[in-house]
Image: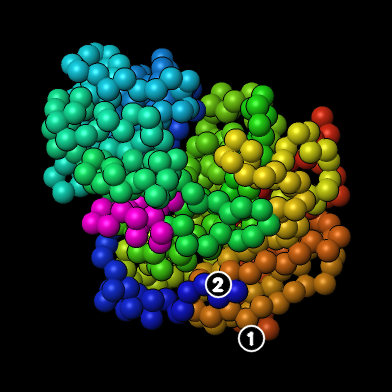
Amino acid sequence: MKLFTPLLAVATCLLQTASAGSVFAHVVVGNTGAHDTAAWANDIKLAQAVGIDAFVLNMGYPDSNIHTQVANAFAAAAGTSFKLFFAFDYLGGGQVWPAGTVAADPPNSVVSYLLKYKDNAAYFHYNNAPFVSTFEGKDNTADWVPNGPVRSKVGAIHFVPNWNSVGQGNIGAQLDNIEGFFSWDMWPLGGTNKTDAIDKSWKAATPGKTYMMGVSPWFFHSASGGEDWVWRGDSLWADRWAQTLDVKPDFVQIVTWNDFGEAHYIGPISNTADVAAGSLPYVQNMPHDSWRDFLPYYIAAYKGTPFVPLKDQMQYWYRTAPVAAGNTCGVVGNSAGNGQSTTTPAQVLEDGVFFSALLTSAAQVQVQIGSGQAVTFQGSAGINHWSVPFKGQTGEPKFSVLRGGSVVKSGTGAAITTGTSLADGCANYNAWVGSF
């Protein structure tokens, strides 16, 4: 399918209708225990190179790793134009965040973290106020009321929480306590593709507030010891970026930079010690770095900035075996813990190769799986996206851009096989991602 009209037309249209926003990448600080300042500096360099404006530092409580790694992150960002801000995670650390009343060093509460870092040159501000978010926290909404325990000590903030569990019917009662809203609902249910209907309904339920839209490429929750599930990824990365042009959010948050256990990381695996041991077999040899390759274009389109590609590029991703290969090992489709009726992974996932082409001008785009029949698509200048099913084919997929019958560029992906590559026989629902 064609997601965007030709680049120059997109740029012209967006310059008239869209205001520049900011794009953030969600970083799970709990997954950076092996980081030092140099590793943070490398992450920041990679993020800046593709147009990301800031890292969202997701912090669970209590986590002894947080204090050191937040300090490392701010040290790495010093002297750069890159920014950081906090998202207090009320579910991920085992306990809820205390609001706190006084500054402390090391920080041990919402208040003490904000007092320590809100005036740091690397902290992200919006409308002259430090930007603050959460992951959930519906039982602690009173902490954020005007003149409440946080604002009375910290002062003005631009507070954009993720309070999906409050519900759209009840969020109206919180409008005086927030400056914006962030919806975590960015993955489809069952075997359907994700639409932007939920984003539009949250915007309508929070009038006069800024809206932060989540964009994620994949979801496979692996080896947690609890519920493990998969939501449909497939064409999600391309679909959600196209939907930013429809929703026109004030901010976009990419989920995530480094959540390896949920398989939606777009950052590098710089140290396997940052990956939970149970998830490591599902992550090894499954790079996702190439999902960043088209971000300069996607971000420019979202911000309404002209972007003309200097070269033809392709980006491709897929599972390296059919959904029926290997044992589910307890993985289900959908999540009971999120109030959903569960099903099998086979009812959620497509056996297919998903690929996008960023073209300097009209061209043919071709994919061939192993020795199978090549499938050809006609692409236009700008970005294009398609998929082809496995149909029992195995081997290395070859991706090509052709003009006038000649191959301009081509690349080869990891081989598709008929069985799982995991030693325990479990199916791997993670994606392999490549590009040229």
Residue 318 screen position, x and y as percent: 68, 54
Identify the residue at image location x=48%, y=42%.
256
Q: Specify few, some or many for label 2: CA neighbours under 10 Å numbering under 14, 14-19, or 20 or more.
A: many
Callout 1: SS? loop
Q: Is residue 184 above or below residue 395?
A: above
The span shown in magenta is 200-214
Say if residue 430 shows up in the picture. Answer: no
Binning the other alpha carbons within 10 Å of mark 1 as few (below 14), some (14 to 19) or many (20 upward) gives few
The answer to whether 119 is drawn above or below residue 430 in the figure is: above
Give, as a three-letter code, the residue at label 2: Asn
The N terminus sits in image quarter: bottom right
Percent coordinates x, y for residue 288 in the rendering: 57, 46
In x, y percent, where is residue 262? 58, 38
- 3D distance between C-alphas at marks 1 and 2: 19 Å
In this view, the residue in front, 276 or 172, is: 172
Q: Which residue is mark 1?
A: 404
Residue position for label 2: 384
Q: Give residue 227's position: percent from left, percent from top.
A: 66, 31
Residue 18 lies in quadrant = bottom left
Mark yes or no: residue 195 visible.
yes
